């Protein structure tokens, strides 16, 4: 399949597809980070994760409309406010959900899965009723449009770079929160041994709620970033939930580094194959490989050594 | 095979089976016209899947979110046979290549692919309906259970498999009919399946098969095997330490669930007249779990009622109030987990059965079911 192309063209193809893969990678990382906190740390399956993401996207959409109507002068900066809003709205809803639903089900992970699936259906229907069934897109500020030419054959879109920068930034923020802050220590303590963590004075219920909230908040930010490269519909979240879970499981559920590594390998494999095969076959092959590897190595790429 | 202490049917089971048989074989055929009866036949095909899930999930504790895969494989095997019969050279002479299924012709394929060839034979197709999904389930089961993958990971991976199969079917439309599926099925060995008489007959065949599956499921549940499954669900390690090979039991029950789902799929194809990827993917697969959960994850009879009621509600509400249906379904998922984890069967045994017993003032034989699912208790055991 490589015979039809010259070396230079092949290089450019790989570079361009590699870059498209990097954008996909950023999206995967953003989506998977929230899940890595909720699923990886707390062990809670949140099937409504995609819907929290979409909530962030809709918040961004509303903010952009507000800025366009009332503060056109500041329109180029609206995105940063939208991101913060998305974090707090999605995080707030997440804490509410934890209080109403999740906290009753910590001992029954499979039931959590079903309940959050129900939640995702409800949220989808609410989005459909409020925002309509059609996809909505936000208007991107001018400075984010266009692309940077690197060589005469390779160009990279600016919004893609922005999403990548955002992914790196948020990964760092999550890393610092999880591994360098006292909150992160508490979260990890509660995950490893709930009873003991309670005994040394950690408010486990509050930690759980905050963790779930922050995980959902990160999903909201991911959704917000998502509007920069695609449009948002009520069911868009459901399309990504399987990919996202596979990314987290493939990486090794409790490992942040593993999540990033697996997001990288899955997205790169998919986007490079997409050029040579049809999109659907690329996806099938990627997912099959991931499932195949998971069957051989169920603990994922980067597993913590635990004695079960 | 059977434990001597436990009769095959407790009195409650016997009444349950009897009432269900009355409903399926007498009340529905008398009370409904052919169109509605066919609709109920379609609902009942989901009951096969729900019974399989009771075994896997309720008894064995294995939640598969990929039952749609087996339902679909069974359905597609049946549909391939029917499609080949419907695409005789005479019936398809307007095509550029007569004698091949219409969707292949639309996709510029000029001969029937080699893996379609055996489906010219009805015997092969009927065997394939069961065997293909079971072999597939066996491979998944061996790969996962031997490595002690269970619980949530298993659920996610089966869900991914459902997603993969859907993408594959849609992507390879020349060989599978793509997103429309395999449609326009006409005859089974010359017998037209679209007439009213055929529909009524198929309904009864469907009901008969359903009862055969119910008996099989009851046999599994009442046997020693069923006890081990329940023990495994509650305390897997203890069962392992007692010398049982846990993985084999899990593989067996997963394959049994797949076989049931496949029969349902094949009957679905026969009664509805087509098969498409919209019965394979993530969403239908997880809806099959809710059928089982609503009926009661521990009760095979409950699962049948769950399949009937949820599908009936789905048809009714999505016609009348399309917006409310998703909200209702979502609420159902949450309610069935939070409020009544044992579903309709649990509500029956908690509230109605004691009253009935009181009315008759007759002591029913003790039907202490060790499989009774008590979330609080299981949680407490798990925490130990």
Image: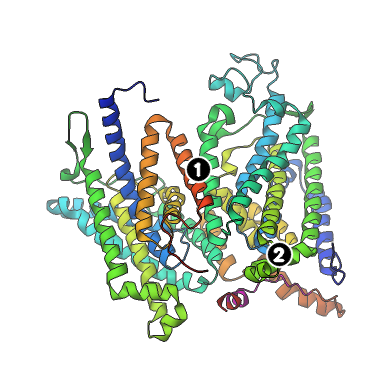
Left or right of residue B18, residue A159 in this image: left
The image quadrant where one finds the N terminus of chain A is top left
> Where is mark 2, residue-wise?
B244
Residue A38 shows up from this direction: yes
Q: Quadrant of residue B177?
A: top right
Q: Are marks 1 and 2 in contact (CB under 8 Å)?
A: no
Q: Is residue B361 above or below residue B98?
A: below
> Where is mark 1, residue-wise?
A288
Comparing A19 with B361, the one in front is A19
Q: Quadrant of residue B370?
A: bottom right
The spot of residue A288 in percent (x, y) is 50, 43
Residue drawn 62% across and 24% down? B113
* Residue B255 lies within the magenta run: no
Left or right of residue A126, residue A161 in this image: left
Residue B193 shows up from this direction: no
How far apart are the alpha carbons under marks 1 and 2? 32 Å
Comparing A109 with B211, the one in front is A109
Q: Secondary structure at mark 2?
A: loop
> Which chain contains the residue that carries disc 2?
B
Magenta-colored span: B368-379
Left or right of residue A256, residue B305 in this image: right
Q: Secondary structure at mark 1?
A: helix
> Which chain contains the residue that carries disc 1?
A
């Amino acid at each position: 399949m490589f015979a039809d192309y010259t070396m230079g063209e092949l290089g450019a193809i790989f570079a361009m597809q590699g870059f498209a893969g990097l954008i996909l990678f950023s999206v995967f990382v953003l989506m998977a980070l929230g899940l890595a906190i909720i699923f990886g740390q707390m062990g809670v399956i949140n099937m409504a994760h995609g819907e929290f993401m979409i909530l962030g996207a809709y918040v961004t959409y509303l903010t952009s409309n507000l800025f366009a109507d009332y503060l056109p002068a500041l329109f180029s900066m609206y995105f940063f406010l939208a991101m913060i809003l998305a974090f707090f709205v999605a995080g707030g809803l997440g804490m509410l959900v934890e209080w109403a639903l999740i906290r009753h089900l910590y001992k029954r992970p499979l039931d959590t899965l079903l309940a959050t699936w129900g939640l995702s259906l409800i949220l989808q229907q609410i989005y459909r009723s409020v925002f309509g069934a059609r996809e909505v897109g936000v208007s991107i500020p001018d400075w984010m449009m266009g692309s940077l030419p690197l060589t005469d054959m390779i160009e990279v879109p600016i919004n893609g770079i922005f999403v990548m920068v955002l992914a790196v930034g948020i990964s760092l923020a999550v890393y610092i929160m999880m591994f360098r802050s006292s909150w992160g220590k508490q979260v990890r303590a509660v995950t490893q041994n709930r009873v003991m963590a309670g005994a040394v004075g950690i408010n486990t219920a509050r930690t759980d709620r905050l963790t779930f909230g922050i995980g959902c908040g990160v999903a909201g930010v991911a959704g917000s970033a998502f509007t920069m490269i695609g449009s948002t519909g009520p069911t868009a979240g459901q399309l990504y939930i399987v990919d996202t879970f596979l990314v987290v499981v493939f990486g090794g559920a409790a490992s942040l580094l593993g999540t990033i590594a697996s997001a990288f390998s899955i997205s790169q494999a998919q986007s490079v194959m997409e050029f040579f095969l049809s999109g659907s076959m690329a996806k099938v092959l990627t997912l099959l490989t991931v499932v195949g590897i998971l069957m051989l190595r169920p603990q994922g790429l980067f597993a913590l050594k635990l004695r079960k | 095979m059977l434990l001597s202490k436990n009769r095959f049917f407790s009195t409650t089971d016997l009444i349950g089976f009897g009432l269900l048989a009355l409903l399926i074989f007498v009340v529905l055929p008398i009370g409904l016209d052919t169109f509605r009866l066919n609709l109920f036949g379609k609902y009942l095909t989901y009951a096969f899947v729900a019974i399989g899930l009771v075994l896997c999930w309720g008894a064995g504790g294995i939640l598969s979110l990929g039952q749609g895969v087996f339902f679909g494989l069974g359905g597609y095997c049946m549909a391939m046979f029917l499609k080949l019969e419907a695409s005789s050279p005479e019936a398809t002479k307007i095509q550029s290549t007569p004698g091949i299924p219409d969707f292949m012709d639309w996709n510029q394929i000029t001969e029937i692919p080699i893996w379609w060839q055996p489906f010219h034979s009805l015997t092969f197709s009927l065997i394939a309906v069961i065997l293909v999904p079971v072999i597939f389930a066996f491979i998944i089961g061996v790969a996962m259970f031997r490595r002690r993958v269970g619980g949530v990971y298993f659920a996610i991976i089966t869900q991914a498999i459902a997603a993969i199969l859907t993408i594959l079917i849609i992507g390879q439309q020349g060989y599978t009919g793509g997103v429309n599926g395999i449609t326009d099925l006409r005859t089974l060995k010359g017998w037209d399946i679209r007439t009213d008489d055929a529909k009524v007959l198929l309904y009864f065949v469907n009901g008969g098969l359903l009862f055969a599956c119910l008996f099989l499921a009851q046999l599994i549940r009442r046997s020693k095997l069923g006890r081990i499954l329940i023990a495994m669900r509650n305390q897997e390690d203890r069962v392992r330490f007692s010398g049982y090979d846990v993985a084999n039991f899990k593989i067996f029950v997963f394959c049994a669930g797949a076989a049931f789902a496949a029969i349902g799929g094949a009957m679905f194809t026969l009664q509805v007249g087509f098969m498409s990827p919209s019965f394979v993917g993530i969403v239908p697969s997880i809806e099959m779990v809710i059928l089982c959960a609503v009926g009661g994850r521990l009760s095979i009879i409950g699962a049948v009622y769950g399949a009937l009621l949820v599908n009936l509600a789905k048809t009714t509400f999505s016609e009348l109030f399309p917006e409310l249906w998703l909200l209702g379904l979502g609420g159902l998922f949450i309610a069935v987990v939070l409020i009544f984890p044992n579903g309709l069967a649990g509500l029956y045994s908690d509230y109605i059965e004691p009253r009935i017993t009181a009315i008759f003032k007759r002591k029913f034989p003790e039907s202490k079911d060790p499989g009774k699912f008590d979330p609080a208790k299981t949680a407490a055991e798990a925490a130990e």
